[in-house]
Structures are given as structure tokens and as C-alpha cells.
Amino acid sequence: MGFPYTLVTLVFLSMLPVTMIVPVVKDIVKDRLFGSNWEVAFFTSIPMLGSFLFAPVAGIISDRFKNRKFFISFFCFLDAGLFYLLTVATDMGLFLFLRFLEGAAHIFIIGLLLSSAADQENDPKNKRYYGKGILMGITGMFLSLGGALGLPLGILGRSNPLLPFYVGSSILIFVGIMSFLLLKDKGIHTVKDFKLSDLKLAIFENPFLFVPFMFNFIDRFTVGFIISSFNIHLRETLAFHPGMLGVFLGLVLLPMSLLSYPSALLSRKTGVLPLVLVGSTVYGIFLGLSGTTNDYSYLFLFLLICGIGAGVMFVPSMMLASKMSKPGLTATTMSAFTGVGSLGFMLGPIVSVQMQTVFESLLPKEYSFSALSFFFGFLEIGLVFMTIPFFKKILSKMNRIDEEREKITLANPDPIL
């Protein structure tokens, strides 16, 4: 079975509209609908609430009807319609409700496209990819790459801030048509359902699972700050136009995408935990520094190094959660890992606006945003310092789990999901 070029391309394209509209959030929410920074925060966080609530529904429905592509196509068209409706809504309440529905619709698309990749990887007949994790890794990389390259496309909104919504809607229609015509359901391979009791068992067996969970939460929490308060700071304080904003924000996401595979390879020599700690430290330091300068060249450099730090620790943090999971509970652990990250992304914009209000009331205006930026950067650094004392214990626990997994594999060659 060959490489699924069509599937990977559709994953990439489906992410473009999500970040394409980020550079024009200020124009739409604050200028067009006369909203505040709070509405900007809600605009960026409320689709994650929709995704968080409806992600399990997407999998259940798709598995029950034994079909992926029809649901992917349908929700592409629905999402495209919601993108268009966002351009005509003039009431803030309705606007945010449509945004919530859009997030719910989009998780059906992304979730089921990733499920299609998992179907191929979990198919015993697929000797090339079965149980190796390669296909999911490549698909995840193109998912991140689509998000990263969508940001610079925000330049489309420089003359008309509604244009990224129109283009995003058109892309989703194209993805829907191509999914219907080209995707093939070659067998639905489900994994063990998520159960809270299984998660409790996994954490009871290994309390150090909280380490990758907390890193993923804080990582996504800080991204919420970047696309909300930091976004508005660049637009209003530094007078960035949408295209320039997209390029600078892309400096964080693009290295994260491009370094995903190299960091996975590097982890074979260094181990995953050192990369998580080093990458998180670099990310936290330069995220903090990014809010201290008005010089474009320094800001470019700080954000680029911040993105490199994110790229170093992004995949290893996922691998850390997987490696620390008790055999037989990997699917449950990774579902919880993803859910915790979504929760962080949802809360990040709201907390960042609240903390910005606090710092503005306590500090002179010229220092308040720098303090806010360092607050989010120090969350990463603080988590690193909290983890270091447990470094040897975590490695020891990982080694014991690897030995247990190896014994089970020798007794039963089929992979445990």
C-alpha cells in the first residue's frame, strides 16, 4: 500500500482556514463589531470548547456508521457555510455562537481525517505502516505545517479583513469535494474507548504521567496568549498589518512543524525528557523576551528561537506521555493528553486578557505587557524547575515500563492500543 498523498494533503489544506483568520481577528472583532479584548479572547477560545465537546461525538458516529469520507465531506461544507456566516453576522452574541459551531464542525473534519490515517496504520494488512507510528507522525507534521503556513496568508486581509474568511470557506468546499471523490474507507479500525476509570488506573500506576500532561497544558495555554493578547499587542502597539503579523506569528509555529520529525529522531540518542526540558526552557525564555521589545529585528529573532524551542519539545512531550503509559492504556493516556492540551488552549486567551488587566492596573503602561509576556514564559520555565528534581525517578519509571512492554510484546506480537 502506497503513501496516502491525498489524505495528507487534505489534512494540510483543512488547517489553512483555521489560522488564516488569526491575523484579522482585531479587524473583525474590535473594529467591525466594536468588541473588546475579552471578545477577542472568546473568539479564539470558544471554538476549542466546541472541539472539546464534540470530538468524542465525531468518533462515535463515524465508527457506528463505518464511514469516514461522507462525514468529512458533509462537515467541510457545513464549516464552509459557518465561515461565510461569520462575515455577515453583526450581533456579537450570534457571531460568537457561530464561532462555537464552527469549532465543533471543524473537529469532525480534523478528527476523522486523522482517524482515516489511524485506520491505515492499525490495519494488519498494511505491512508498510502497521503499528509503526510513522504515518500518524507524518500526518501530525502536515497538520502543524498547515496551521503554520495559514498564518502568513492573513495578508489577504490587509485590504479586506473578510477576505480570509471567504478564501477559508472556499478551501473547505474544495476539501469537501476532494474528500468525497478521492478518499476511500478501507476498513474502520477502532481502538479502546476512553474511560475515566482507565485514566485513573494509568495515573495510579504512574503519577509521573502528570508531567507530560502539565507540559502539554502549559504549552497550549501559552499559545492561547500568543494568538490573543500578543496578537492584539502586535496589531495595536507595534502597528503590524495582517500579513506582517502572520509572518511573525508563523515564526513560532513553522519551526515547530519542521522540527517535529528531526526531534523525534534526536530523541533516540538523547531520550525524550531532556528534549522536553531544554525545549521548554528555550521556549519560555524567548516567549518572555518577545514582549519586551519594539524592535522588529529583535522580535523576529526572539520569536524564531521561541519557535525552535517549541519544535524541540513538541513531539518529545507526546512521546513522553506515550512512553510513560501503562501497556494497554496507551489510547486512554493519549486521549487525556490531547484533551488536557485543548483545555489549556481554551483557557489561555481568557486568562491572558484577565492577567493583562491585572498588570495594567499594577504597573506603568510601558512595563505591563512585558510583565504579561514574562508571566507566560515563566510558566514554562517554572514547570521545568519543578520537574528536574524528579528527573532520575521519571527515567527509572520509563525504563521499567519499557521492560514491561517488551515482555508483553514478546508474549503477544500484536501491538497493544
Image (cartoon, rainbow, N blue to C red):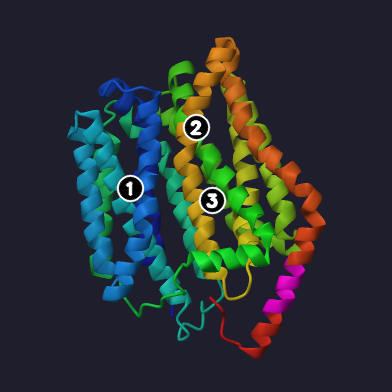
Determine the image quadrant of residue 317: bottom right
Closer-to-camera residue (82/24):
82
Q: Main secondary structure of the magenta part?
A: helix
At mark 3, the secondary structure is helix
- Which of the two discs, 2 and 3, sits closer to the camera? 2
Look at the numbered disc 1 and give the secondary structure of its residue.
Answer: helix
Instruction: Specify whether residue 301 is in view.
Output: no
Gap between marks 2 and 1 measured at Cα = 20 Å
Q: Amino acid at mark 1?
A: Gly
Instruction: Where is residue 235? Give x, y as percent.
Output: 43, 22
Q: Residue furthest top?
A: 364
Q: Position of residue 306 (x, y in %)?
A: 62, 38
Mark 2 vs 3, N-terminal side: 3
Circle 2 Cα neighbour tier, 10 Å, few/some/many (<14 / 14–19 / ≥20): some
Viewed as shown, does residue 172 lie left or right of 271?
left
State the extent of the magenta-drawn residues as a range.
398-405
Task: Please report whichever mark, 3 or 1, sits nearer to the chain's N-terminal start.
Answer: 1
Residue under label 1 = 103
Left or right of 273? Residue 291 is left
Q: Which residue is mark 3?
A: 257
Distance between the alpha carbons at the discs numbered 2 and 3 = 26 Å
N-terminal of the pair, mark 2 or mark 1, is 1
Foreground residue among 95 and 133:
95
Question: Is 18 above or below relative to 182?
Answer: above
Q: Residue at x 50, y 69 (%)?
A: 135
The residue type indicated by label 3 comes to Ser
Amino acid at circle 2: Val
Q: Is residue 176 magenta?
A: no
Residue name at image x 40 percent, y 55 percent: 12
**Tag 2 and tag 1, C-beta contact below 8 Å:** no
Q: In front of the other: label 2 or label 1? A: 2
Q: Residues within 10 Å of mark 1 (few under 14, many from 20)?
A: many
